[in-house]
């Protein structure tokens, strides 16, 4: 009995926008596809900040990869961790086995970068995965709870002044990084305090919540045209966000953040912000897999650790290995003046579809012109009815940009089901200003009043509550 | 300046059905209410099994308590852990402070009981909180993933027989306890394998998933009329659930469960079920707080640790302390033949409202007749279109019982918003058989193939996938 000739084997590392679109575009190709991911779901990262602020549930922005591909018979999903590749023998190495390939697509994305200060991670979590989003949610909600508990102490005559400072520290939030993620997170935390939680507490006034946004360059959303940056800046300030541009974070402690202001004369002044709540949205670097692949193939990497790819998104000297999405440095400038494509979902999607086409055409012994990015523009939301958008020469802000943002983000959600679910929840919270997923879950779910609560005999809550409440 | 007279202080421990209903019923009373809970949300426990099987998101069945009470000006919420009470001085003791009361309502509920085998907890998690639900979800989904990964090995000629056994172990699920939670969880896991995941995997056949339901008494749902038990039994078997009644679990190991069959002649035979996936729904006992309160007040406790209360739900000798809901033993029988009310949401709700009334009438110096439970019946769902319900003398099964179950459970969800959200998701999964919240989150999110994966040189996934797939 003769066996059928083995089909061309395509292995894709990563089930994000790049990997998933490459895989789906290969649906009708005469290849077998194996998509490897560490997680069993495709995550829509641009909406992570809404999970972090209780607006959406994790499952609303995460879709099981097996579900997405279940009708694509030439594709299979492998839940596993890639630790390297054997480029010579064309094998992907996993922690527990290996997978042979004829063509490899690497779409492993990026991870949070603390610019060499990795010890800041424990104090100032980033926002790249669901676990980080629910961790930020836990910290934000517990901060308000802790402030409320500490406010009991103020009812006592001999309450030390440190209690008041401690409360202010819990009600101060610092977001580091003025890109879209930082702007969206800062805006959402401000809205949480000013709107959603306004009537939830009896002692603290959540509308007094202070949110700082710290940005190293001289404006927020610096890749946008200056006019839009200015509009975003003003919209954030209207929400109560205090913006510090031209400021670098020099130290993060559990109780404070130190930032250095660059003065026009070149000198620097220091500012210390007292806070228990610092979140990091300042930078990304290539997945550690980038380095491993570069070493195995002799590929070049850039300052962020991204792999420099050729005009067809493959690694020079290795036409059988493509690198796409955030992990790739695709230069649209000149060798002297490089201008790599930005780390945006549309880039990853278009590159994924492109390399799928290249693979199919190669099997037909045809060549393909170089990859061309079609820039659909970018957008960021600031808050209720506030966003900025740039689409070619069209610059939008305010409600129109916000509606465009809603529409585009709904459309990018992979499943139709989640589109409906998210639309319903957005509609509801627009009307009620509610964010229903305000759950404190995981470990450490109780207020952290240890630092001030040395006095076991103090007399809290109910006594103060016994005062007539009508006056409040 | 004269201060207003201090209002009567009511402290409620626990924001479940009992505590929350007591609190809301006191809305117009001239009292100040402090509701203390360890969690910041009210949890709808009857639907936890749907979170555990990926049908609903945690936030769909959990509502922030502050949100529920934000318009009730005489109530405040305190997030904290109660460790005891000082009954003499009428104070509730927290880990970090204390709260004085005039009237105390204890509604701390129950916790999972392993009947003295607490070491089983790590191997066989219970289903009482959101973290346990997402942990069971993680284990169930990872079991299928691990079986799929191990199936790669079978493609090799020299694959040891142990691999096949190992795969079967991962595809076998044991649910201990044949009450409503156990029945619903077993039914949902069976449906996951037979329906939702049917086309998700390429190597394993998830319709071959084996689910065992182990029950100590001689029938499942033993509090229901025998005819309904029989119908539930048959419906479970149609779903592919293997039922073992009259069986006690004698040992749980990570790789197997040992059960003892009671034979009609009084002897016992042993059965060992090889499985990596055991879940515990066999029993509950009173919250540890019950013991603390009993010791502080001299109250009696029953075998399950519940506090025996008087006709008005208060502790004998302590009219100012009420115990309600699952934590209370309210005897509707005689002292000789006790017949305590069951641990059901309607009991807790009615007792909560009742004690609120007692408190108000006492302030008006009026007495209140003893608590009377109005039995609205009970119901349990088995699977798609299958449920049993008992309402007085009305016994329902099949689709009608299922529709009644849907309606009642939707109505018991505290927020209108979650009602709509859950209704939408149920409708969608009824049509598509999809369960969209199939996320593997937390730690240990990769398949556990260690035990068999000693051979680093094996060649998996893509090679096997390269065979023509059209035949499958």
Image (cartoon, coloured by chain):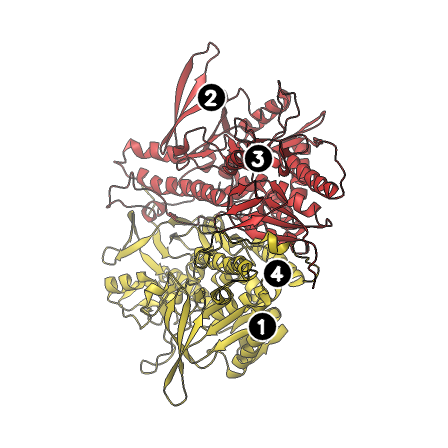
Chain colours: A red, B yellow
Q: Nearer the viewer, mark 1 or mark 2?
A: 1
Chain letter for mark 1: B
Q: Which residue is mark 3?
A: A327
Name the side, left or right, on which B86 lies relative to B329.
left
Disc 1 on helix, strand or loop?
loop
The residue where tag 2 is placed is A247
| x, y percent for residue A254 | 36, 34
- Which residue extends farthest bottom? B265
Q: Nearer the viewer, residue B138 or A329?
A: A329
Asked whether the residues under the numbered discs 4 and 3 touch, taking CB atoms below 8 Å apart as contact, a structural biologist would say no
In the image shown, does A122 or B409 lie closer to the viewer?
A: A122
Sooner in the amino-acid sequence: mark 2 or mark 3: 2
Any part of residue A53 in sight = no
Classify the position of the C terminus of chain B by image quarter.
bottom right
Position above or below: A392 against B14: above
Residue situated in front as seen by the camera: A382 or B174: B174
Number of numbered markers? 4
Select label 3 or label 1 by which is in front: 3
């Amino acid at each position: 009995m003769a066996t059928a000739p083995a089909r061309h084997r395509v292995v894709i590392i990563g089930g994000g926008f790049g990997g998933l679109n490459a895989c789906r575009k290969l649906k009708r190709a005469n290849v077998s596809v194996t998509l490897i991911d560490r997680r069993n779901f495709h995550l829509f990262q641009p909406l992570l900040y809404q999970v972090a602020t209780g607006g959406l549930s994790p499952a609303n922005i995460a879709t099981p990869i097996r579900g997405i591909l279940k009708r694509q018979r030439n594709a299979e999903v492998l839940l596993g961790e890639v630790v390297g590749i054997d480029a010579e023998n064309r094998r992907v190495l996993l922690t527990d086995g290996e997978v042979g390939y004829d063509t490899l697509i690497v779409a492993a994305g990026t991870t949070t970068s603390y610019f060499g200060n990795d010890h800041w991670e424990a104090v100032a979590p980033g926002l790249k995965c669901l676990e980080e989003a629910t961790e930020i949610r836990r910290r934000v909600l517990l901060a308000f709870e802790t402030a409320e508990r500490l406010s009991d102490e103020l009812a006592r005559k001999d309450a030390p002044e440190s209690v008041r400072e401690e409360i202010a520290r819990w009600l101060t939030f610092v977001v580091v990084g003025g890109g879209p993620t930082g702007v969206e997170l800062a805006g959402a935390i401000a809205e949480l305090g000013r709107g959603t939680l306004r009537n939830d507490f009896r002692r603290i006034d959540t509308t007094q919540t202070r949110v700082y946004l710290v940005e190293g360059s001289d404006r927020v959303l610096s890749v946008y045209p200056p006019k839009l940056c200015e509009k975003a800046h003003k919209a954030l300030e209207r929400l109560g966000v205090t913006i510090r541009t031209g400021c670098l974070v020099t130290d993060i402690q559990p109780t404070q953040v130190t930032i250095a202001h660059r003065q026009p004369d070149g000198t620097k002044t220091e500012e210390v912000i007292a806070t228990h709540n610092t979140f990091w949205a300042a930078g990304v670097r290539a997945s550690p897999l980038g380095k491993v692949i570069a070493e195995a193939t002799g590929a070049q990497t850039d300052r962020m650790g991204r792999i420099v790819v050729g005009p067809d998104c493959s690694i020079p000297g290795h036409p059988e290995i493509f690198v796409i999405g955030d992990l790739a440095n695709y230069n649209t400038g000149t060798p002297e003046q490089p201008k790599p494509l930005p780390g945006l979902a549309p880039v990853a999607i278009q590159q994924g579809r492109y390399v799928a086409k290249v693979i199919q055409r190669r099997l037909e012994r045809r060549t393909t012109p170089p990859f061309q990015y079609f820039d659909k523009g970018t957008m960021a939301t600031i808050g209720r009815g506030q966003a900025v958008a740039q689409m070619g020469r069209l610059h939008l802000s305010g409600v129109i940009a916000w509606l465009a943002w809603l529409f585009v983000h709904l459309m990018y959600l992979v499943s139709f089901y989640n589109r409906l679910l998210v639309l319903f929840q957005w509609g509801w919270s627009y009307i009620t200003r509610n964010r229903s997923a305000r759950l404190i879950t995981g470990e450490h779910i109780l207020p952290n009043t240890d630092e001030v609560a040395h006095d076991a005999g103090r007399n809290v809550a109910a006594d103060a509550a016994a005062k007539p409440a009508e006056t409040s």
